[in-house]
Amino acid sequence: MISILIPVYNYDCSLLIKELAAQSLQLKEELDGEFDYEIIVSDDASTDLNKQKINMTAALTTGSTYIQQKKNIGQAHLRNAMADIARFDLLLMIDADAEIFTKDFIRCYWQDRNKGDVICGTLKNPPGPAPSGCELRYRYEKKAEKARPATARPKAPYNYFSTFNVMFHREVFERIRFDERCTEYGYEDTLMGLMLKKHSYSVIHTDNPLIHKGIDSNQSFLKKTETAMRMLYKLGDPLQGHTGASRIASKLEKWHLKKCTKQLYKSIKKTLQKNLLSHHPSILLFNFYKLGYYCSLDDSNTI
């Protein structure tokens, strides 16, 4: 029995809700009592009231549960709260900006349910060229997708853990849960991966894909990235020195190069931003921008 949990903020996930409901209902009828499901959609105080209405209508017309948060509580807290009210022992968490493009998505999760403590599906990027003005996120995700081929993910299951498309056994989730210090965008999945590894829970990666449709504009993604760097800086251990920009920053500090990196970043920040907000952004410059921004957080007035 599966509880399907969809956290949403300012995104129209009505088609996702309907397709999940259709596949789940079909499987329930086929298995005749051996399978059941529920869908819970929780809106984290979206500012777009029209999208709220669309998602609520889709949820109610499919027999799903719709919850409207009165204030924004963040992805980690929201996911924990949804798990708390879920009725079943399998917790399938799906990001609102996902799109189903296979007819057996729910069936595959049901068939794979006993293969591990946590079952991770796949994230695929939409085909075709990048939408105009969204080139930075598109290029970043395309490069990330190439870096996590199906052959690599089972070899480093915790490193490739993602909350985009994942199913937990409830007893596992209740022992670790998401770190609610993650009140803003970024790193709740990384922390969860570290906790799963610490407690030696098995994470199995399967080829059960969803398309990532939420390709942010260049400006929006750059702001999200800055938010994520601040979140990483504030979280401290166990992420500090082990993850992304913080790991490189620790090495730079050891080599007495962190101050130089910070000064270089500040001197070319506007030039970097001009490139990253253009139609031809460089991922190499984007990675340096993240590193420089993270290093600059040592200055208290930057946070």
Image (cartoon, helix red, strand yellow):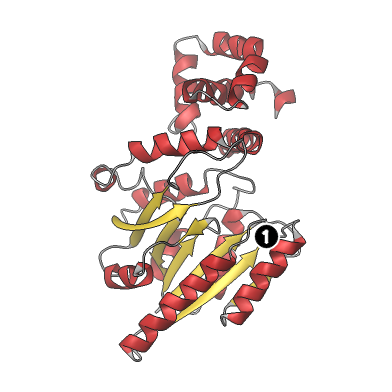
Residue 185: quadrant of the picture: top right
Seen from the viewer's position, the closer of residues 10 and 38 is 10
Seen from the viewer's position, the closer of residues 190 and 153 is 153
Q: Residue at x 42, y 46 (%)?
A: 127
Position in image of residue 150 (x %, y %)? 27, 47
Q: Residue at x 59, y 9 (%)?
A: 264
Seen from the viewer's position, the closer of residues 9 and 69 is 9
* Residue 109 seen: yes
Quadrant that contains the N terminus: bottom left
Position in image of residue 71 (x %, y %)? 75, 59
Q: Amino acid at mark 1?
A: Asp
Seen from the viewer's position, the closer of residues 166 and 274 is 274
Quadrant that contains the C terminus: top right
Q: Is residue 28 left or right of residue 185?
A: left
Position in image of residue 122 (x %, y %)? 36, 53
Residue beneath label 1, please? 44
When the figure is inspected, residue 278 is found, relative to residue 85, above or below; the finding is above
Category of crowding for the residue at label 1, using alpha-carbon neighbours closer than 10 angstroms: few (below 14), some (14–19), many (at least 20): many
Q: Is residue 299 left or right of residue 80?
A: right
Q: Is residue 235 left or right of residue 160?
A: right
Which element type, helix, strand or loop, lies under badge 1?
loop
Q: Residue at x 56, y 40 (%)?
A: 131
When the figure is inspected, residue 37 is found, relative to residue 119, above or below; the finding is below
* Residue 36 seen: no
When the figure is inspected, residue 93 is found, relative to residue 245, above or below; the finding is below
Q: Is residue 42 left or right of residue 117?
A: right
Position in image of residue 102 (x %, y %)? 36, 64
